Image (cartoon, rainbow, N blue to C red):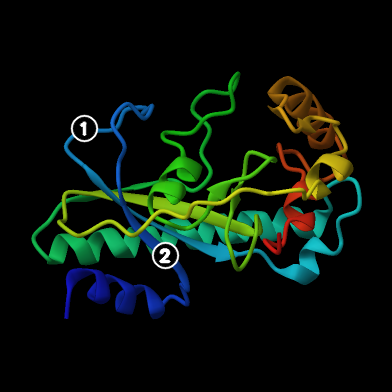
Amino acid sequence: MSIKEKLKDFLKDYNIRIVGFGNVPAGIEKFEIAKEYPRTIVFGYSISKEVLETINDHPTLIYKQHYKTVNWLLDQTAYHLVQFIEDQGAHAIAIPASQTVDWQNQKGHISHKLLAVEAGLGFIGKSGLVVNPQYGARVRYVSVLTDLEFEPDKKIIGDCGNCKKCINTCPAGAISEQGVDLKKCLAKLKEFARMPGIGQYICGVCVKVCDGKI
């Protein structure tokens, strides 16, 4: 059994069905991350369709809790995966699923989205999110960086074509054919964060409408 098969079998015990293997691209922006980890394992949980259906033009309390739960599960699973990799005699570090280290630009330690693309899990859509062929943008990802040796998965070449669902539904009007206006997006997230019980930068509208069926 190859090391990739061993890793996939390990993750199956945590109900992980979305997983890819890739190289960490040269030049990718990192925060406080050692450079001796050239490869990445990226995996994700799909977001509940029924929870997403509770969203209209703003996040809901149940979506907030679901969002937090999925991120927690990802971090827990990544922790166990790191231990498994260390048992194989290699080194690894788990990057938190949702930890902001640059608030002004809304960046984490490293881009899970870019690593997911490198690991063959999807392409970057018009919304700026990873579009997975099966689940669309309805996936939360986490990344484990490692020096474990394996062959990267084949990258997915694709685009959104004529689909404009996220453009037409974005409550901030931040998405266009030219890309995402991060200032507009962030302003709307700040507005949502002030809603009773929300208290964090979440939305979910473009996630809801993107099912990957282009």
* Mark 2–mark 1 distance (CA, rounded to whole Å): 23 Å
**Where residue 15 sits: x, y (%)?**
47, 77
Whichever of labels 2 and 1 marks the residue nearer the N terminus, that label is 2
**Number of the front mark, 2 or 1:** 2
Residue 171 appears at what percent x and percent y?
Answer: 88, 37
**Above-or-below relation of 197 to 9:** above
Q: Position of residue 101 (x, y in %)?
A: 49, 28
The disc at residue 35 is 1
Number of marks: 2
Question: The disc labelled 1 sits on which kind of residue?
Answer: Lys
Going 38% across and 54% down the picture, which residue do you hit? Answer: 119
Near-viewer residue (172 or 167): 167
In the depicted view, which residue is nearer to us: 177 or 199? Answer: 177
Disc 2 marks a residue whose amino acid type is Val
Which quarter of the figure is the C terminus placed in? Answer: bottom right
Quarter location, residue 75: bottom left
Front-lying residue, 35 or 128 = 128
Q: Residue furthest front?
A: 162
Q: Secondary structure at mark 1?
A: loop
Residue at which label 2 appears: 19
| Residue 112 point in image, percent of width and height | 46, 44
Residue plotted at (65% across, 59% down): 136
